[in-house]
Image (cartoon, rainbow, N blue to C red):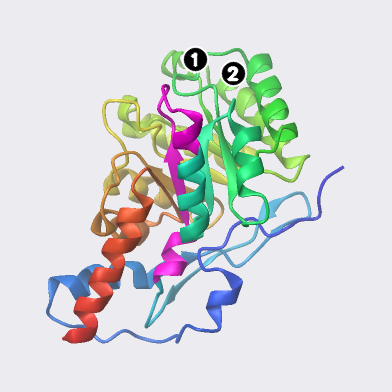
Amino acid sequence: MLHDFTAIDRFIRIDDVAELNWGNHKNTASSNSRSIRAIMRCWIPTAALQNGNELQEGNVMNVNELTAETLAGMIDQTLLKPDATLEQLRKHCEGAAKYHFKTVAINNAPVPFCKKILEGTGVLCDAAVSFPLGQCTIETKVFETIDVIEKGAGEVDYVVNLVELKSGNWDYVEEEMRRIVEACRERGITSKVIFENCYLTDDEKKKLCEVALRVKPVFIKTSTGFGTHGATVDDVRLMKSCVGDKLLIKAAGGIRTAEQALAMIEAGASRIGTSRGIEIVEGFKSMQNTREKQ
């Protein structure tokens, strides 16, 4: 049965909103202030999924202040190394809980292990499906999606079939997306479609956005981080120009600093996938401290 929703995702946590002052930010000359301003034009989805799970229009808001906690709440803290040990996963989850990240993005086999560690923290398990190549059948991807949800995943990121896409089989691409997104939607789980933009032309990226607009996953995502390059500001802008406020965008792959994260956010990303979440949040704190001293 469909959940009536359930707010999908907010750029700013509800308990943070009361702490923020809305209005126009005063420009300053420093580069640090310019970096801070990048996060001040935030994409804040105003809605939940309702009536057929359609995302209502989001707004762009200017904020005078953003906390490090707010930034942390939009990070998928990632550990997808094939040789990650259970002890490394444990520490990864403990760090995510300490910083209040949105999720830990992990391969699907350790989801039950991580789910147990994260119990009561509010941090979700974000499971990677058909990762990183996307070269499983639709039936396999759907099974994998349902299986990992049943084992505790709160979000799912799946990789599109690039062979079918590059061969021009768009009906296949749309059917695959529809079945996986429906499997998530029926279980009240956030779905993310990984484009792997490094292998796509701009026309292919636009066409894949058009498919996503018809199917309506919660997020479209730039990259796995395992391709020839990760997220770029230009790709985020292109995706945002295609989907507007109808879908959310996750930037992932190669985002290692606060400055990079802020640039992706300014371009239109609502979620950041990174293995450097702690460094990004600490870097943001340093930027805030520098700004306060000016």
Residue 27, given in percent of the width and then of the height, sits at: 21, 83
Residue 256 in view, yes or no: yes
The answer to which image quadrant residue 221 occupies is: top left
Pick the front one: 268 or 145: 145
Above or below, 115 against 66 in this view is: above
What residue is at 59 percent from the left and 57 percent from the top?
A: 9
Query: In the drawing, what numbered circle is on residue 172?
Result: 2
Q: Amino acid at mark 1?
A: Glu
First in sequence: mark 1 or mark 2? 1
What residue is at 21 percent from the left and 80 percent from the top?
A: 291
Assign the N terminus to one quadrant of the image.
top right
What residue is at 28 percent from the left and 59 percent from the top?
A: 258
Query: In the drawing, what numbered circle is on residue 141?
Result: none
Residue 162, given in percent of the width and then of the height, sits at: 44, 19
For label 1, the residue is 164
Residue 167, given in percent of the width and then of the height, sits at: 44, 13
Residue 190 in view, yes or no: no
Left or right for 39, reference 121? left
Q: Amino acid at mark 2?
A: Tyr
Above or below, 63 against 284 in this view is: below
Q: Is residue 76 magenta?
A: yes
Assign the C terminus to one quadrant of the image.
bottom left
Pick the front one: 282 or 88: 88
Q: Is residue 188 magenta?
A: no
Which stretch did the figure color magenta?
A: 68-89
Evaluate if marks 1 and 2 touch, with contact meaning CB atoms under 8 Å apart.
Answer: yes
Residue furthest front in the image:
87
* Gap between marks 1 and 2 measured at Cα: 7 Å
The answer to which image quadrant residue 30 occupies is: bottom left
